[in-house]
């Protein structure tokens, strides 16, 4: 069995790769931060990201990481602490708001079905026909 040393994605220290992109120290630290931030958010709804960091002593980057990963999310009744990467609406967790997720899903789907390519072909044919006149 090969032992592979990797650089931790978080703290940039070398560690023995175990299938995780971050080192065991950071895993423990993230778990600890997760518990702290989660209990704080649940007890104190509708606070800013800054306040969460100050009160829990957890780095803003770590709180952001947990929220973006979807591990943590703010209460549905309170404004999100982070914003959608596409439109800037505040969201409770993840990268994008529901609306942007739906529109992205549509974008993906419309690229797949054959009906669309048939449509494009007929349009091209029409153009070609026009040009011959
Ligand atoms: Zn680390
Ligand atoms: Zn959005």
Image (cartoon, grey):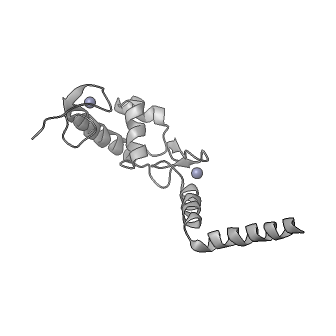
Quarter of the figure with residue 115: bottom right
Q: Nearer the viewer, residue 56 or 85?
A: 85
Which quadrant would the C terminus be assigned to in this image? bottom right
Residue ID at (28%, 31%): 8
In this view, 17 is above or below 128 = above
- State the residue lying farthest toward the left: 1
Quarter of the figure with residue 61: top left
Left or right: 69, with 83 as reference point: left
The x, y position of residue 86, in whole percent, is 58, 47
Which quadrant would the N terminus be assigned to in this image? top left
In this view, 122 is above or below 81 = below
Left or right: 39, with 109 as reference point: left
Q: Nearer the viewer, residue 77 or 23?
A: 23
The x, y position of residue 49, in whole percent, is 47, 36
- State the residue lying farthest toward the front: 132
Residue ID at (38%, 45%): 43
Residue ID at (39%, 39%): 65
- State the residue lying farthest toward the top: 13
The x, y position of residue 91, in whole percent, is 52, 49
Left or right: 101, with 52 as reference point: right
Residue ID at (28%, 39%): 21
- State the residue lying farthest toward the right: 133
Count of picture labels: 0
Quarter of the figure with residue 132: bottom right
The x, y position of residue 75, in whole percent, is 44, 52
Q: Nearer the viewer, residue 52 or 14?
A: 14
């Amino acid at each position: 069995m090969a032992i592979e040393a990797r650089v931790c994605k978080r703290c940039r220290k070398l560690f023995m790769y175990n299938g995780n992109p971050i080192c065991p120290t950071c895993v423990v630290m993230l778990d600890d931060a997760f518990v702290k931030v989660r209990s704080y958010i649940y007890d104190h709804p509708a606070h800013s990201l800054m306040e969460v960091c100050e009160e829990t002593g957890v780095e803003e980057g770590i709180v952001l990481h947990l929220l973006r990963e979807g591990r943590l999310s703010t209460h549905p009744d309170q404004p999100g602490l982070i914003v959608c990467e596409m439109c800037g609406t505040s969201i409770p967790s993840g990268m994008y708001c529901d609306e942007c997720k739906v529109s992205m899903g549509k974008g993906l789907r419309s690229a797949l079905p054959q009906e669309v390519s048939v449509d494009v072909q007929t349009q091209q044919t029409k153009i070609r026909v026009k040009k011959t006149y």
